[in-house]
Amino acid sequence: MWVYITRRLLWLPTLLLMVSAVTFVLGTYGPGDPVRVMLGTKYDKDTAERLRSSLGLDRPIMVQYLDYVSGAIRGDFGESLRYRGRSVGSLLASKMWVSFQVNMAAMIVSLSIGLPLGFWIARHQGTWIDPAAITFTLVLMSIPIMVSIPIVLWALCLKLSWVPCSGWGGFFDLRIVVPAITMGIPGIAGLARLMRASTLDVLGQDFVRTARAKGLSESVIDIRHVLRNAIIPIITILSFSLAGMLTTGFITERLLGIPGVGDFAIQAIFNRDYPVIMAFTMILSTAFVIANLLADLAYSLIDPRIRLS
């Protein structure tokens, strides 16, 4: 296993180098000029050239790229073009931590309801519960988040006064309830349907029929055989969700006043703040590689038949 982990981690620098190169080239030759955006209505050709020289944007692209890579290796992602004097790392760290907490709360809601619901629906296949529950989950998945947020705010904030209406106070603050519910609802529906399909597939396997023939109770069969095997496809979905925890929805942050990274990333794109975009891309790429590695390790822990080599 350790050989497998080491080999996967050794592949990470190569992947990040390719991602950084593509992103850097697109940022350099893509539409838009960060200097023009920074100067705005005060744009002047001479001033723009001086600013471009002070930022090092007039150097050859290869020199700029190698300088960026050498700094990124040391953990220095440069300085924001929009927020002068602020390092990209300091800007992203706090906002990504907020986004991680919001996504963690949403995932807890999705997992705690979606997985048991999907398993329960599968165990009631052939009854009225199955089509009714599937229809209900489809309705949940079809509700846009810009619709669910006002509904949840109206119920929990205006009518019941259980939670504050907006803002951010941390993971253990009541203001996390609304984003957790609104972002977790689509996850509940998706996980429930996926868990139902996976459970039905496992229930039709020979080893389940053999376990019943041996006289094992249904609860033992469900826990030892059905649930452990049905959860394997779910891990793949959760690995991508784990990597996406460093981002939140742009709409959620705007409507609820959450200082996460989603709104900040959108602003960086519009402002051509390429150091922020580069750092954001690199961090997400690293997160996806690590999340997939954790998923592979989870496969081997849940199902002993799966071997990592």
Image (cartoon, grey):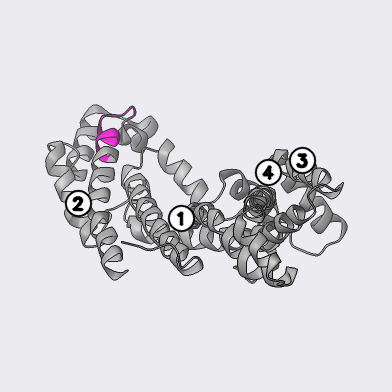
Residue linked to disc 3: 139
Image quadrant occupied by the C terminus:
bottom left
- The mark closer to the camera, 1 or 4, is 1
Residue of label 1: 243
Q: Residue 28 lies in magenta, yes or no?
A: yes
Closer-to-camera residue (283/257):
283
N-term mark: 2 or 1: 2
Q: Residues within 10 Å of mark 1 (few under 14, many from 20)?
A: many
Q: Which residue appears at 13% of the width and 40% of the height?
A: 62
Q: How far apart are the alpha carbons under marks 2 and 1?
A: 23 Å
In the picture provided, is 188 more to the left or to the right than 231?
right
297 with respect to 3 (left or right) = right
Q: Measure the C-alpha gap from mark 2 to mark 3.
A: 47 Å
Q: Nearer the viewer, residue 242 or 20?
A: 242
Q: Which residue is mark 4?
A: 145
**Left or right of residue 212, residue 87 in this image:** left
Q: Position of residue 123 (x, y in %)?
A: 76, 56
Q: Which mark's residue is nearer the viewer, 4 or 3?
A: 3
Of residues 155 and 304, the one nearer the viewer is: 304
